[in-house]
Image (cartoon, helix red, strand yellow):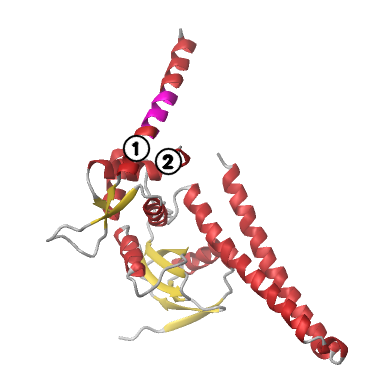
Amino acid sequence: MKEMLPLTEAFYYILIVLYTEPSHGYGIMQDTEKMSNGRVKIGAGTLYTALNTLLNKGLIELYPVPEGTDTRRKMYAITENGRQVVSAEVARLEELLGVGRQALITKKG
Amino acid sequence: MSEKLVKRHRMIMAWNYEKGEQWMNELSSQGLHFKKGGLISSSFVRDESVRYTYRMDYQTGQSRENGKFQEYLDLYQDAGWEYVSSFGLTWHYFRREWQPGEEPQLYTDRESLIMLYKRLLGVISAMLFVNLFIMILNMVNLNTFFTEGLWTIGVPLMILYLGLFALLGYGCWKIKKKVNNLKLQV
């Protein structure tokens, strides 16, 4: 799993969006834009490529589309491996953030 | 009402497909909207009331039968891209209405763009090697070309092959350069 780190922003946001609940491509795009306050907009080609890569690596899987919803749209869910990658990435980012903040404080003081 | 198609000629090179997009977008700003692409000529529809932004995409391994292609189109459509047409099984044209100040892209990060270039590089270098192989086979089997018909067949054939290799080799080099540029850009 370690070879997946660091995650690209697109990979990271896809996994974070799916961490709470399964979603379809369009939902992932919208949630990503909302979560990042409009900063990260994942293009269609990038999303399509990323979803296929994540499926191949077993970090996400297809989720059976619930009845009564648009069956045309594929839904994706995060896998156990995917959750582990997210935890490892969050820990890595925390370390980076920690030393960064420390450096900023020391510089000021 | 049937649409009147207008032809325009231009060869879009796979390793320079961005130039093709530019060309389509420029024509669209003049009221000529791309419909269908060919090797050297493309069809356009005239309509002065709209303007589009066109993008090209290259995908491999999609079969029309297993629904993968439809899923792909659905995803792009959800993202606001109207599917226009395809060239062969691998090049796909999309468009969306032009908005001032916006430059919508299909690929929004370096990694996915590098993967796109690598798909292209894989296919072009495969073409290069297949042709090299065919040429070597020809050399072995048809060495009479060089003894009896050197100037009628042998030399013209060599020139044709050299031209083809030069073109494909140039394409590979161009794409390699693009990948390297993206990798350097941190």
Q: Is residue B3 visible?
A: yes
- The answer, for residue B16, to whether it is visible in the render is no
Front residue of B186/B36: it is B186
Image x and y of residue B168, in percent:
66, 68
Residue B174 x, y percent position in the rendering: 65, 59
Instruction: Indicate the chain on which mark 1 is placed.
Output: A
Subunit that carries the residue with mark 2: A
Which residue, given by chain and number where applicable, does mark 2 sit on? A1
Q: Is mark 2 on a helix, strand or loop?
A: loop
Q: In which quarter of the image is residue B125?
A: bottom right
For the residues labelled 2 and 1, the Cα–Cα distance comes to: 8 Å
Quick check: B179 above or below B165? Answer: above
Q: Do the residues labelled 2 and 1 touch (CB within 8 Å)?
A: yes
For the point 51% across and 55% down, the residue is B115
- Residue type, label 1: Gln
- What residue is disc 1 on? A84
In percent of the image, x 35 and y 64: which residue is there? B72
Please provide the residue range marked out in magenta. Answer: A89-97
**Badge 2 and badge 1 both on one subunit:** yes
A95 drawn magenta: yes
Residue B49 image offset from top left, x and y in percent? 35, 70
Q: Where is residue B40 in the image (x, y as percent from the top left)?
A: 57, 78
Q: Residue reaching furthest top?
A: A109
Q: Is the magenta stretch mostly helix, strand or loop?
A: helix
Circle 1: is it few (<14), some (14-19), or many (20+) Cα within 10 Å? some
Instruction: Give the mark nearest the N terminus, 2 or 1.
Output: 2
Tell me if A66 is positioned left or right of B94 in this view: left
**Closer to us: B97 or B135:** B135
As shown in the figure, which amino acid type bears the numbered disc 2? Answer: Met
